[in-house]
Amino acid sequence: MLTHPLSRLVWLALIGTGLLWSFLGAYDPTIWLMEVFPILVVVPLLLATRRRFPLTPLVYSLIAIHAWVLMVGGHYTYARVPLGFWLQDAFDLGRNHYDRIGHLAQGFIPAMVAREILLRRTPLRPGGWLFFLVMCVCLAISACYELIEWGAAVALGQGADEFLATQGDPFDTQSDMLMALIGSVAAQALLSGLHDRQLRNKLSGQPHAAHDQERDAR
């Protein structure tokens, strides 16, 4: 996807437009930077590796969706996203649950990224062990993010409230990690078939994928 100029331009325009919108009128510029920082790291990394290790269109598309989830949260802060207020009113919830959507995505999208890397760079094959290890990777990512939130709380004190978006929930950390776990399971259950087809198409047409094909032949 990113190896084709037009596709790369559309992908970058989608994320770049989102970043600009997200920044303009952001509720708190510091919180905005903290929320979108992963995008500022991942996008250059993906561009730098687009020829050496191009990902499937599915994974690139999911990454763009995740970027928008982060950008919306950065623009409003997670506790103030209008979609979360709509869900709160529609389902008579006690808080704005947009952050739950964010943590669901934190499991859903990284699950497919981890799955692709593990399938292409390790002897793992589709099956139970792959499913389990992808879940473990997503839980590890979620745990690291919670540690970052803890560090922000220590460093910023009460000023970290907007970044943490706990909204008075004493079990916010556990709920966030549970959502990431659910996301990782859902992604693999729903998208593994499509992902496998795209991987086969990609690897069959790329000379540098000999390692993957040789592994599959064993």
Image (cartoon, rainbow, N blue to C red):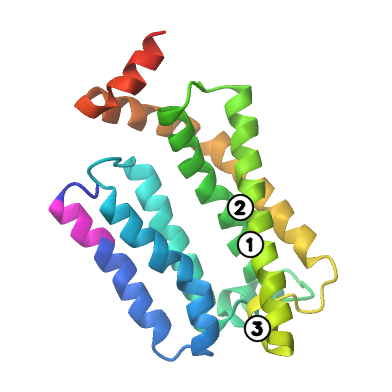
Question: As drawn, is 155 to the left or to the right of 113?
Answer: right
Picture layout, residue 117 above or below residue 177: above
Indicate the amino acid at tag 3.
Answer: Glu
Which one is earlier in the sequence, the residue at label 3 or at label 2?
A: 2
Q: Is residue 139 among what the camera can see? A: yes
Indicate the amino acid at tag 1.
Answer: Tyr
Of helix, strand and loop, which one carries label 3? helix
| Rendering coords of residue 56 (x, y %) | 33, 40
Picture layout, residue 104 above or below residue 172: above
Between circles 1 and 3, the one closer to the viewer is 1
> What is the quadrant of residue 11 in the picture?
bottom left
Q: Which mark is residue 168?
A: none
Picture layout, residue 154 above or below residue 209: below
Q: Which residue is mark 3?
A: 162
Picture layout, residue 29 above or below residue 84: below
Q: Which residue is mark 2?
A: 141
User: What's the residue at 55%, 83% (across, down)?
Assistant: 31
Q: Which residues are magenta?
A: 5-11
> What is the quadrant of residue 43 in the picture?
bottom left
Indicate the amino acid at tag 2.
Answer: Ile
> What is the quadrant of residue 89 in the picture?
bottom right
Is the residue under label 1 in contact with that under label 2 (CB below 8 Å)? yes
Q: Which residue is mark 1?
A: 145
